Amino acid sequence: MAATGESECSMSPKTRPRASKVWVYFTTDGDKRVVCSLCKTSLAYHKSTTTMLEHLKRKHTGIVEDAPTEKERTMHEHLKWKYTGVVEDVPIEREKTMMTPSKHTPAHSIPPHTLTRMARQWLEEDTPNFDPAGVCVGSQEVEARLLCKSPHSILAGSPFFTAVFTEVGCTVDWFYQDGDEVGPDPVTLTAVVRGPARCLLLGERPALNCLARASGIATRCSQLRKMATAWGWHGEVAGTRKTTPGFRIVEKYAMLVGAVSMHRMDLSGMVMLKDNHVWTSGSITEAVKAARSVCGFSSKIEVECCSIEEGIEAAIAGADIVMLDNVQPEELHAAAAALKQRFPALLIEASGGVTTQNLGRYFSPHVDIISLGCITQGCPVVDFSLKVQKPVCLSMKIKEELAP
């Protein structure tokens, strides 16, 4: 091959081999610019298709799914330039680009080892030693149907339900997913559980407890979220730490499924200075100063206040959130508006005395968060039952087969 006096690196777009499919969408404009055929945008060309590929991804979503990566393009071009005729039939293995994000699944927030640990604790609590009733049923394979008897309920807690039965060697097939509305029939088949009879019955009560409690909370949360949406309110409905001891993960998870905020998970999650902290410290300012010295920049500080004056002191001291606690709606709206006007970045939370019946009175453009203890306290459960299917009697089968 005769020398041309021109290196491969200095080849112009007009003469450079074009292995990348990106070139389908561009034409050259001199030696240092290219033009997008789709939108006529002119781009600088620096002997690389990276800029062109990024342009297609940003401006023309969906057409570059099969485009090779820069690394693949470079390898392929090198082979074509150095070993002419060798790579004509060699396809480029292309990375698949995810063009649309996957739906967020609350269950993915629970680590598998956490589910296993909790399932074992619940089973240990319910059967600490012998299971005399297990002798009656043995280990024959059976099937049980999970029935929901509370129409229009929101299903929640399936990861915990499944974890319990997995721990005792059973399987669960679901007909609904967490977040789905179950119904409207009076009784709805929700899942089927299969496994050894005695093992299935060992998991029955712990699993049902989780599902009934979580679904009840998720149903209430969903109702509250819909109410906020109907009012056109921009803020967040939130739960509290008023949860059942040992059951917080289940109840907080149910809030997620019901589309409300969990608020802080525990005392380590965020600093909340309540009246007892302030009284013991001597003042809101001193309490905030002491808390900030420990939590630093990585945690927010919320201060419980009962008046606009306390809210101003908290904001000046450096609080991120002011909770107006047990403040009547009319006074709350005025205080929130005044605080927002002076401290635009301050978050305002309303709490105390808020119920499902009066929630609408607390909605305000100046209130960012409304927390309710009744999300978990006094919340009704969803009625579920698990029914083992009776084996069909042999004589009945014969009669059915002989029937005309």
Image (cartoon, rainbow, N blue to C red):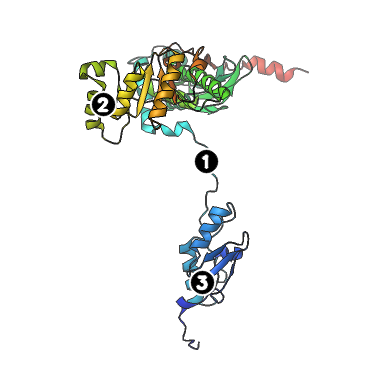
SS category of the residue bearing label 3: loop
CA–CA distance in space, label 1 to label 2: 40 Å
Spatial CA distance of label 2 from label 3 is 59 Å
The residue labelled by disc 1 is 102
**Residue 322 visible in rendering:** yes
Q: Quadrant of residue 244?
A: top left
Question: Which is closer to the viewer, label 2 or label 3?
Answer: 2
**Residue sticking out furthest to the right:** 404
Nearer to me, 384 or 261: 261
Up/down of 156 relative to 18, above or below = above
Q: Which residue is mark 2?
A: 288
Which amino acid type is shown beneath numbered disc 1?
Ser
Element assignment for label 1: loop
Q: Nearer the viewer, residue 395 or 56?
A: 56
- Foreground residue among 129 and 211: 211
Expressed as whole percent of the image width and height from the top left, the position of residue 100 reads: 55, 45
In which image quadrant can residue 301 be found?
Answer: top left
Q: CA distance from mark 1 to mark 3?
A: 39 Å
- The image's mark for residue 32 is 3
Mark 1 or 2: the one toward you: 2
